[in-house]
Image (cartoon, rainbow, N blue to C red):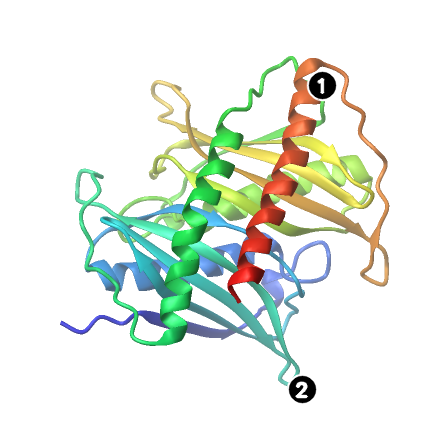
Amino acid sequence: MSRPHEITLRFLAAPTNIGYSGNVDAGVVLEWIDKASYALAVGWCSGATVTAYVGNVHFTSPVRSGDLVEVRAHMVHTGRSSMHLQVTVDTLDPRSGERRRATSCLVIFVAVDADGRSVPVPPFIPASPDEVRAQESAIARIKLRADIEAAMAAQQYTDAGTAPRTTLRFLAAPTDVNWGGKVHGGFAMRWIDEAAHVIASQWSGSTRNVAFYTGGVRFYRPMRIGDLVEVEARLLHTGRTSMHIGVHVRSANPADMRFELTTHCLVMFVQLDDAGRPVPVRSWVPVTDEDRALDAHAVELVHMRAAVEEQLLIEQ
């Protein structure tokens, strides 16, 4: 059986996709990434699949209303039940013909059965030197990714922290789910971006904030229609122009209100001036031991992310 190992979605960015910055929100771009990845993963495993991880999403160029958007996902590696996909988002200005890379990232899906248990997937066998290099890169990043996940999971987020925080709460709607009856990972990432935007706006005193990096997006369990969803964002660290924000997504059946962690990640925002350039933000000063630990954690993640990017440069 021949299985497609890549897929490309093409469409125009609509005015309804535009956020407070005047360009398409990062959360919408993440939603597009998840949809393209999901389509490829389902086709590859011929069954149900769930988002497990999204990593190293560095937004390098804005997506504008009217841009022709091209989201390309291609398989680079498979494990027993996992599918590792490299995704790129490019834009084309229909008027000038200018083509730009908006972002790229790695997305991992896991094939599951009707009970949510992981099941084997057909192996991906590289057929060209480029595909061999892409697979080797994906394998090399497995340990780096595991180290980042472990560092994030080890942190404590309690009421002892004094950093600005916000919590969004709502019910997961039928329009939020995929064909497997679970909430799209892309919707969860959009909610993450929205909660982080609230914190960035609160701290900077402006709504002209954009995400330039989202990483370590780890999905632990699915969300279902009717679940009460809680998205908590907390400021962890500030740089000269950057705001580092930790986000946790939890969900519960409203009948028992037992919240469980579904997703967590780190989002980095900058405030823009009228010309679209980053501007300095006021410094946040940790007060409690938990504040200082989370501030140090955010700095550690910056160094770990740099190690991932250095690894990618070495492999290119």
Q: How many marks?
A: 2
Residue 244 percent coordinates (x, y): 68, 38
Label 2: how many residues lie within 10 Å, few (<14), some (14-19) or many (20+)?
Answer: few
For discs 2 and 1, the disc positioned in front in the rendered view? 1
Q: Nearer the viewer, residue 69 or 72?
A: 72
Residue 241 percent coordinates (x, y): 80, 46
Residue 193 percent coordinates (x, y): 59, 45
Residue at 38 percent across and 75 percent down: it is 129
Q: Is residue 310 visible?
A: yes
Classify mark 2: helix, strand or loop: loop
Residue at 41 percent across and 73 percent down: it is 130
Q: For the residue marked with disc 1, what is the amino acid?
A: Thr
Q: For the residue marked with disc 2, what is the amino acid?
A: Arg
Query: Do residues under tags 2 and 1 come within 8 Å of each other at their CB atoms?
Result: no
Residue at 35 percent across and 71 percent down: it is 6
To which residue does mark 2 refer?
95
Label 1: how many residues lie within 10 Å, few (<14), some (14-19) or many (20+)?
Answer: some
Q: Identify the residue at the far left of this view.
A: 1
Q: Quadrant of the N terminus?
A: bottom left
To which residue does mark 1 refer?
162
Quadrant position of residue 143: top left
Q: Is residue 88 left or right of residue 175?
A: right
Residue 191 percent coordinates (x, y): 53, 43
Q: Nearer the viewer, residue 310 or 19?
A: 310
Q: Is residue 14 left or right of residue 22?
A: left
Q: Judge whether 261 appears above or below 107 on screen.
A: above
Q: Is residue 103 left or right of residue 228?
A: right
Residue at 33 percent across and 52 percent down: it is 178
